[in-house]
Structure formats: C-alpha cells, structure tokens
C-alpha cells in the first residue's frame, strides 16, 4: 500500500477514535507513541542505544506541571518550557555520552539519568514521592478550553502528528541520510568529511526535545507527574516498545507503544474485574504482573521476530515481491517455448 494512503487512513481512524474509545486513554497512547518514535530516531536511524530517555520524558513533565500548577503560566508556554528543559538536558547528557561508543555510551546515559531521578526525588518543587498533583489543563492560546476531553484529544493528536511529521522529514532529509551512514559505518562517514560527533549530538538533542514534548503532553493529559516517568524502568519500557514494533521503521514504534500501553491497561482492568466478580482480592494485583508479560513478549520478539512486528511484515512483503517476478519470468519462458 502506498505510504501516503496508509498515513491518510491512519489519520482518519485517529480522528474518529474518540467517538468509539475513551479519549484520555487514547491520548495516553498517542503520548507514548510519540515517545517511542523520538527514541527510535536515535536508536533506529542513528544507532545510539540510550538507557536514559526517561530523564527527558520525566523532566519535561515536571517542568510543565510545576509551571502550570504553581507559577500559573499559559498552557502553551508550559509545554514549550518542558520541551526546552529536555532539549538542554539532552545537550548536556549528549555532550558527555557521545565521547564513548557502544555499551559505554548506554551506561553513561543510564548513570546520568539516574542522577536526574535522584534530583527529582530530592527537589522540593517535585514533592518527592508524592509527585505533582492537580496540574490544570487551562486554555490553549486563551481560546480552546482543554478541560474538555474531546478538545484536548484533538490538540494532542495535532501535537503528535506534528512530531511524527518532523521525524519523517528528518529521516528523509540529507541530515537523516548522514545519520544512517553513521549508523551503518561511522569510520567511513568520518572519512567522507562528516563530523560524526556533531551529527550524533544533534540527533540526541532532537530526540530529547521530542521526548520532552511527549512527556509534557502526558502531564497535561493526566493532570499529574510522578517519579515513575523519570525512573530507569521507563527507559527500558520505551526500548521494549521500539523493539516490539520494529526498530528502524516509521510505524513500528507506534504499534509497539499501543501494544505495551494497552496491555498494561487491560491487565489492570482484568484483575479488577476478577476481584469484583469472585471476591478474591488477590486478582486486583494482577495488573502488577504486567512486567512478566512484557518480559515474555520481549523474549519472543528477540527469538522469533528480531525485526519487530512491522519489520517482519515488511520483510514478508519483500520476499513475496521477489518471488512474483521470478514466477512471471518462468511463465514467459514457458510460453516462448510453446510458441517455438
């Protein structure tokens, strides 16, 4: 299917989704989808595995939540401040991390992200383990009332579509082609005259800024921000989303985010239903076992679907496409023989 047709159908489905689903849950899906796409820009197209993206996701959420609930800034300024915070943090962490490669790069990002976590735990404005509560949605540009779930859904959809479009444009730009070259063969890219560290740093900062946009938007949607978003497990979760959907593909991280977030939500609902229907309170903790299920999914994907869901589907269509010309060639040869 043509990509433009697919994107159009996906957009139409997204526009109709709040009339058949719960808008707040759908907005949460969109925020995590943008988070996964931003992370995929770094690992899938630049070849940098970061274990510290939770720092950008959570710090932007904290900044936006604090400015909206305590300072009283307009909504759009609060989101922009969150994005700016994650971008600056990405510049600092990226400047230190890109000096090393491979697992050392990953460990540096993890260590620095844990420093951000402990700063969030101890800082008075984050309220420690209680987190920020009651973050107001306000009005967008002083006109659109974001207190209405339907209105906010379309604002969030517009933000996520814009972020996704920026990622697509970046990947298909000359800048994106250099990133792919660095991923495939960094020494060769350097020999061609490209400053690999500069390109990697720019990609890191852009990924951090888009991650911050997802984090700020999520805080606005849910109305709170906690340490969960800045903990290292959130970095692991976005890695899982990207791998399950398909690393290095455009749509794969979105599919992966939808699967993981929906799985977490449905396990919790199933546990509550069983607890209410049977009277056994143990079932209410069923949602806590989602880590076991996601771990099992990760193992299955690594062993059987190494390209991820979208990657495997694309490889299947590619194999089918290669077989068709061969079959048509054999038919034509047979027809020529009969004619002779």
Image (tube, rainbow, N blue to C red):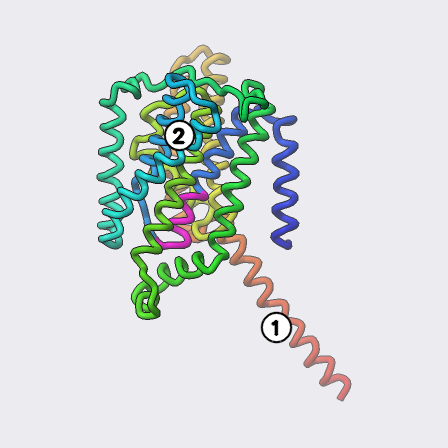
Lower sequence index among marks 1 and 2: 2
Residue 47 in picture, x, y percent from top left: 35, 54
Residue 185 in picture, x, y percent from top left: 34, 65
Give the residue drawn at x 53%, y 21%. 139
Q: Quadrant of the N terminus?
A: bottom right
Q: What element carries label 2?
A: helix
Look at the magenta stretch and give its main secondary structure: helix
Q: Is residue 242 inside the magenta stretch?
A: no
- What residue is pinned by disc 1? 326
Residue 207 in picture, x, y percent from top left: 39, 44
Query: Any mark on residue 227, and which?
Result: none
Q: Is residue 41 inside the magenta stretch?
A: yes
Front-lying residue, 156 or 184:
156
Q: How far apart are marks 1 and 2 (CA)?
A: 46 Å
Residue 292 in picture, x, y percent from top left: 36, 33
Residue at the right extreme of this rendering: 339
Q: What element carries label 1?
A: helix
Query: Any mark on residue 290, and which?
Result: 2
Query: Label 1 neighbourhood size at 10 Å, few (<14), some (14-19), many (20+)?
Result: few
**Is there any visible trace of residue 52 in the rendered image?**
yes
Residue at the bottom extreme of this rendering: 340
Give the residue drawn at x 55%, y 61%. 318
Front-lying residue, 184 or 202:
202
Give the residue drawn at x 26%, y 32%. 116
């Amino acid at each position: 299917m043509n990509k433009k047709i697919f994107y159009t159908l996906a957009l139409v489905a997204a526009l109709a989704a709040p009339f058949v689903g719960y808008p707040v849950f759908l907005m949460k899906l969109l925020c995590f989808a943008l988070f996964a796409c931003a992370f995929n820009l770094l690992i899938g197209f630049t070849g940098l595995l970061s274990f510290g993206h939770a720092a950008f996701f959570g710090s932007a959420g904290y900044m936006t939540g604090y400015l909206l609930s305590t300072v009283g800034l307009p909504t759009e300024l609060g989101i922009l401040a969150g994005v700016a915070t994650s971008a600056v943090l990405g510049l600092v962490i990226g400047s230190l991390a890109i000096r090393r490669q491979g697992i050392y790069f990953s460990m540096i990002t993890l260590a620095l992200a844990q420093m951000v976590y402990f700063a969030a735990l101890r800082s008075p404005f984050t309220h420690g383990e209680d987190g920020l509560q009651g973050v107001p949605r306000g009005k967008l540009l002083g006109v659109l009332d974001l207190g209405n779930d339907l209105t906010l859904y379309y604002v969030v959809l517009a933000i996520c579509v814009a972020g996704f479009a920026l990622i697509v444009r970046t990947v298909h730009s000359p800048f994106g082609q250099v990133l792919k070259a660095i991923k495939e063969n960094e020494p060769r890219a350097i020999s061609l005259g490209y400053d690999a560290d500069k390109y990697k740093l720019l990609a890191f900062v852009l990924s951090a800024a888009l991650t911050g946009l997802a984090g700020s938007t999520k805080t606005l949607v849910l109305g709170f921000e906690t340490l969960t978003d800045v903990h290292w497990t959130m970095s692991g979760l976005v890695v899982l989303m990207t791998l399950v959907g398909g690393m290095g593909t455009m749509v794969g991280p979105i599919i992966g985010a939808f699967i993981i977030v929906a799985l977490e939500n449905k396990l919790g609902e199933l546990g509550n239903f069983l607890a209410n229907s049977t009277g056994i309170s143990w079932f209410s903790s069923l949602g806590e076992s989602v880590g076991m299920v996601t771990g099992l999914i990760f193992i299955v994907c690594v062993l059987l679907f190494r390209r991820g869901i979208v990657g495997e589907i694309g490889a299947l269509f590619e194999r089918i496409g290669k077989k068709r010309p061969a079959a048509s060639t054999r038919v034509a040869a047979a027809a020529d023989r009969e004619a002779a």
